[in-house]
Amino acid sequence: MGYNFFNITPVKDSWNKRLNSFLFSLGSAIRDGKSIEIADNDINYTLAQQHRRIGEKGLNVDYEVYTTEQELSKFKVGSNWNDAHYENAVAFRFCGVKRNVSRNGKILYKDNKKSVIYETVSDVLTGTHPDNVTFSCPNCGGVATVAELQSGCPYCNTMYKMDDLFPKVTGYYFMDEPGIDKEYFKKGVLISMISFAAFIILGNIILNHDQLRSVGMIIALLFGAVFGGAVGGYFLFSIFLLFRMIARIISTAGKMGTAGSRRRFEVRMKNISPDFSYEYFTSKAVSLIKNAIFSKNESELPFYKGEPLDPKMKDIIDLNYGGALGFEGFREDNGIVTVETDAFFDVLYATGEKVFLKHKIFSAVFRRRTDIPVNFNFSMTRICCPTCGSSFDATRNKNCPSCGNAYEIISDDWALVSLKEK
């Protein structure tokens, strides 16, 4: 792995291509159920569950990610953090996302948003070689050590180089691009001008039709409509944007209140666990929430320890992290940390013949042990049984298939112990 791209901003072309391959494969994963090569197994598992949910609703979702402006199409690297074997980073770029939801050819919902994609990526540190770390075979999904996969997967005999196994995208989310889109502004102003001019003409025809008998009066009316439409239409659209901005500020007021809680939470966690990463926790929290919501039966999930979810959550066909995670409570008892959060999401619901978007806050409570270091490459698809040492996929088995003992994910990672809509 001789080249460490995490210290490069923006990333080099070869890495930009790989990060884009994840971004532009999301559509086929959600629409067609295809796995994404550079995504880790947890992301592919969640996307497969989302695809199944859409199919069960009898819906087709045309999900397209596209490039907006050429100069903004390259990824840049933000923060990064390490553990003993892996380096992780958050890379971001501008893009656009179109969604078109239909049933039997009838369009039920569509939108088109300019966004910023954030991808969390994990790679092997230069100079390290985690031979004994378990990993899921990209070909058959069997769990084996990295060394075994390089010698030949014990289940399908496929051999891999380290570059085939790493890096992997381990988390992602979109955030709406701030500001007003140029094309939206141009179209809005043009429509407002034409509408205002038409209003002037129609009003004069109704109120002053007796006077519109000469060419001069008609020319004057048309001139007044053009001038009035230009000035009045621009003014009306500016008023509309002002109200839209006020509405956006009101809707995001709750998010603004999360800024201070992040810092307090991070300081307290670092006092308990020096290797704590807020970015890792956020990525993990978003992943667990999405996985629980898209699951067919959350009680069968190894990481969910809460009450049955509200049936309304089974109507969710797409949800995107809103870029804010507020911390409402924090406590430590006997080596167990419990964190109460408010997670902001933009949620797409499908009920009957209606598909609609809502801005939602989910109250989510997470818990984990503090006496075990964080493994930044942890995946529920490759669990190492603490009793017998066997590896298995916990998305398919809650008990170890070798010794039969129940597996408690809290021993290795965060567990979701409560999830409710606020």
Image (cartoon, rainbow, N blue to C red):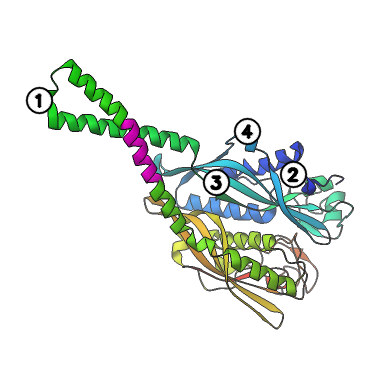
Q: CA distance from mark 4 to mark 2?
A: 17 Å
Amino acid type indicated by mark 3 = Glu
Label 3 vs 2, first from the N-terminus: 2
Seen in the picture, residue 171 relative to 103 is either above or below; the reply is below
Residue hosting label 1: 210
Whole-percent x, y for residue 36 in the image: 66, 46
Amino acid type indicated by mark 2 = Thr
Look at the image and tell me whether residue 100 can be seen.
Answer: no
Left or right: residue 395 compared with residue 313: right
Identify the residue at image location x=72%, y=73%.
411
Label 1 vs 2, first from the N-terminus: 2
Q: Of helix, strand and loop, which one carries label 4?
A: helix
Residue hosting label 2: 9
Q: CA distance from mark 3 to mark 2?
A: 20 Å
Q: CA distance from mark 3 to mark 1?
A: 52 Å
Q: CA distance from mark 1 to mark 4?
A: 56 Å
Residue 230 lies in the magenta stretch: yes
Q: Of helix, strand and loop, which one carries label 2?
A: loop
Residue hosting label 3: 177
Residue hosting label 4: 70
- Outermost residue toward the left in this view: 210
